[in-house]
Amino acid sequence: MAKITFITRDNETIELEGTSGSVMQLAVDNNVAGIDGDCGGVCSCATCHVHVAPEHQAKTGEATEIETDMLELNDYANEQSRLCCQMEISEELDGIVLQVAESD
Amino acid sequence: MKKSKLPDPFAAARQTTGLGKMDDQNDPVTMVLGLKDVRKCAHAWKAFQSGATPGRIVVPSEVAIRTTRQIPFEVDPPEHKDYRNLVEPWFKRPLEEEYSAILSQQINDIVDEVLTKDSVEVVEGFSLRLQSRALTLLLNTPFEEAETWISWGTHVFRSHGNDLDGDKANILYDYIDKRITQAIKNPSNDLYSMLLQAEKDGKKLTREEVKGVMILTFAGGRDTVINAVTNSIAYFAEHPKSLEQLKESPEMVNNAVEELIRYFSPLTHMGRVATQDTQVCEHAIKADSRISLCWASANRDERTFENPNEVILDRKVNPHVAFGFGTHNCLGATHARQIMRTLLTTLPKKVKSIDILEYKENIEELGEFKRKVGYDNLTVQFNKK
Ligand code: HEM
Ligand code: FES
């Protein structure tokens, strides 16, 4: 079981718990505003873009090359960016805080 | 196992110059072939615009047969966003439970029907009908309207031996005109009525703007969906085990849909017009000349996709651009994905195998390239479970 907190663009805090599947799916299942997951998690739509709070980056690890390539041209991407469909829920993620990224 | 293959004609050019050349009605097109270059050019809307003369970013160009600007497709930021915001929620309706339940019923019915026949010509007899019926849901118009759209045949803009058929296009434009007039007189809950009520900058959309959205909705969602569905049938005909696999592992459906759409890339490419002298892949592009973003080539880019020419139904990481990239990414993608997900859920439950009886490939001529995009016709027998 991992507790995962989302902060939406309107600064709403949503605390969720999950055991398996992707972080994107957890967000979509719980209607977290701004996480649409259009492509269902294959890393093709970037509608699951989040910023990981720096103190939690050790838990989530770095974005993969496919993710950084996807986000390379995104005006709201930075070193904290992840596409959360590429993050598998596990105990290790317990306690992380994810800010839903802005989009055009 | 060859009939369902879609070869990649772009590989050599993609690996050398990264570009292709084609003429189109004396308005040549430089095709951008690599995934990263396609993304870059799609992102660079100031240098490569969509808001050129209506019809010019389409290849083959529709400048000679259309004056109505398609919206939001032929509009650049920031205005693009205003239009997009107006229509975006409507085009997300396919996610609603009632919508997907009706779609599921529609697809169940048509699969049941083809299973009773000895032979079915898939393009007209299955895909066009499925696509047209599903479009009544997206437009929120009566189911019977589909019969009219089906009667137009598969090529509203294209007929044989004549790439751009003005008369055929007029059938669609006249039809849309009539429906707009009707919606002005008797507003309902359909897309026409929604658009007629919508406001941009505090002003109601004009009739021409409403027409621009409607033409695009009909045109953008027709051949693309028909090819995606037809090609899927050909694929499953040659891969009956995949049907089995999808039945046993329904959680695979989403990955399978994305993979088939990557592999089929039903929209081969889309143009842009350079607003200034510039460069792509170290190649000079003159102001007011055309480039195209070749989604089909980008989706086979070996630098990103392992075994790009294989269909790997459970491909997990699949950053394809079959629905475009960035600003103009496909507005109909939610609807198209819902159709494909429903199809890939329904077929495995009911169909044991599919036999291909006869087929003729639809090959696009793109200058130095010939690309198979689907079938002119595909006759099969569907066999019951
Ligand atoms: C598998 C089916 C489909 C594929 C592969 C596809 C592909 C694409 C692509 C590649 C673009 C980007 C064009 C560009 O960048 O210039 C696009 C845009 C668009 N598509 Fe689709 N499409 C599909 C289905 C549909 C459907 C069903 C509809 C509506 C009924 C639709 C409506 C649109 C619209 C309105 C745009 C323009 C969006 C904008 O400019 O903001 N498409 N599509
Ligand atoms: S859900 Fe599409 S990229 Fe993550």
Image: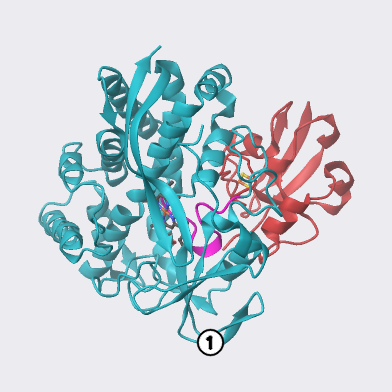
Chain colours: A red, B cyan
Write down the residue under mark 1: B276
**Nearest the camera: A19 or B123?**
B123
Left or right position of B94 against A60: left
Snapshot quadrant of residue B312 = top right
Tell me what residue is drawn at x 24 percent, y 47 percent: B190
Q: What is the x, y in percent for residue A92?
A: 85, 34
Tell me what residue is drawn at x 40 percent, y 61 percent: B365
Establish if B180 lies above or below B91: below
Residue B214 in view: yes
Tell me what residue is drawn at x 34 percent, y 75 percent: B25
Establish if B60 lies above or below B353: below
Which chain is mark 1 on? B
Quadrant position of the C terminus of chain B in the picture: top left
Residue type at the position of mark 1:
Gln
Residue extending furthest top? B385
Q: What is the x, y in percent for residue B257?
A: 52, 37
**Nearest the camera: B385 or A41?**
B385
**Nearest the camera: B318 or B154?**
B154
Snapshot quadrant of residue B171 = bottom left
Residue B182 is one of the magenta-drawn residues: no
Secondary structure mostly seen in magenta is loop
Circle 1 sits in a helix, a strand or a loop, which is it? Answer: loop
Establish if B326 lies above or below B336: below
The magenta stretch is B320-332
